[in-house]
Amino acid sequence: MSAVAHELPASAVNAKLIALISSAAIAVGILLSGFVISEPAPYELYMAGLIAVWALFGLKISRAIVPLLLLLVAMNIGGMIAMTQMADLANTPLYLAVSLFLAFSAVFFASVTSVQPDLYRLIFVAYVVSAVATSLLGIAGYFHAFPGAEMFTKYDRAAGAFQDPNVFGPFLVLPGTYLLYLLLTGPVSRMPLLAVPLLIITAGIFFSFSRGAWGMFAVSAVLLTACLFLQSASGMFRLRVVVMTIAALALLVIAILVILQLPGVSDMFTQRAQLEQSYDTARLGRFARYTIGFQLALEHPFGIGPLVFGTIYGEDTHDIWLKALMDYGWLGFVSFLTLTLWTIGAGFRILLRDRPWQPYLLCAYVAYLGNIGLGTFIDIDHWRHLYLLLGLIWGAIALEYRHQKELRLARPVAVPAI
């Protein structure tokens, strides 16, 4: 028999090649998500092109993902209506263009993962690589490891390749949570390989001196551990989770005590660890602006326009709910609130089901809860990783929808007795 007979058909070779190229393209996009020094960032430019190309060659949107698409589009329509209330548009069209792009990016990630669930692992691995790289930049900047390294800091805090340490820190929470999951559930032989990137990412979160990131990582770790404990029926596994959690907490406390001995770290930690900062409780501080903003929302149901609130009161809203009311009007607020409640409810319903994609859903879900909780105290409107989290969760929702549909079709139909 000739060797030609053993060769794969050209269609199979082409399909495999397309799958490899598409997977690599998504991995590059995730890697770029850790480098957002200016807007539009390379991430936006690259992903906008990738989404357009994918749409041309058959982006499949599951019926289960349609609510995500409709609610995000409705929110952005609210932003466009709010823009009509502005006397001077300034940079508003660009701001709304980024908002709309991020909305489509969430739908894109939900669509590709619902069609190719194997992409979950690739996305998480690429995210870890990106997080480690930007963490190293932030740590190097904080310690002035090389000339010009201070460009990776802001306000004497590690910012990595981000504009703001308060975005840099939360960006690291999902990969940190994922590495923690692998540590708790993987073989002992892999622990040293996982511990190194986890320590780097944890250091990045610490040196960002972002109270929100500290709280998010702590809450995500606790929720992850609790879910793993409840999900498993094995007494040995539960014991392992408890022992490793205690050991991790002990190591964390020791590491923090050692780090606090470094010059300047203790003072910054003490300052940032306070629950209230001067800019929170001032006359027109963050908390005072909340009251003013919600009263303003009652007078302006269509909103006052993106970024206008900051020009009036000197500082932006620093609250995602107030941000939605001011920048996207009541239409945007209701859309975002509905999307948040739907995501939390639908994600929770399938959170502990034994599926190949369940570990990724679990990590994304607990990180998403942390981001939404933090949104009450800070503006998370243009956080790229928030829309990635939405896409990952809704991708799992669509996969579960398809799985249940296949089970119903496979179920034998009862034949009535004659």
Image (tube, rainbow, N blue to C red):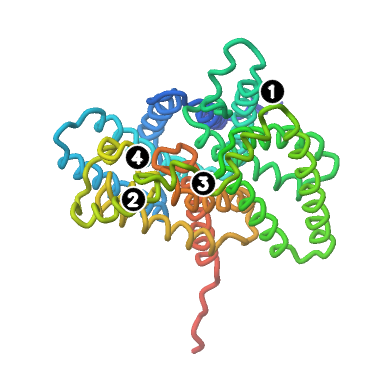
Q: Residue 392: which numbered mark, if any?
A: 3
In three-dimensional space, the C-alpha distance between marks 2 and 3, rounded to whole angstroms, equals 26 Å
Q: Residue beneath label 2, please? A: 322
Q: Earlier in the sequence, mark 2 or mark 3?
A: 2
Residue 260, horizontal then vertical, whole percent = 72, 35
Q: Residue beneath label 4, please? A: 316
Q: Secondary structure at mark 4?
A: loop
| Between 245 and 119, the one nearer to me in the picture | 245
- Tell me what residue is drawn at x 35 percent, y 38 percent: 315
State whether residue 252 appears in this view: yes
In three-dimensional space, the C-alpha distance between marks 3 and 4, rounded to whole angstroms, equals 29 Å
- Tell me what residue is drawn at x 15 percent, y 40 percent: 84
Give the label, 2 or 3, closer to the camera. Answer: 2
Q: Secondary structure at mark 2?
A: helix
Quick check: 7 left or right of 60?
Answer: right
Give the label, 3 or 4, closer to the camera. Answer: 4
Give the label, 1 or 4, closer to the camera. Answer: 4
Q: Quadrant of residue 145?
A: top right
Q: Residue beneath label 1, please? A: 2
Quick check: 410 left or right of 65?
Answer: right
Q: Earlier in the sequence, mark 1 or mark 2?
A: 1
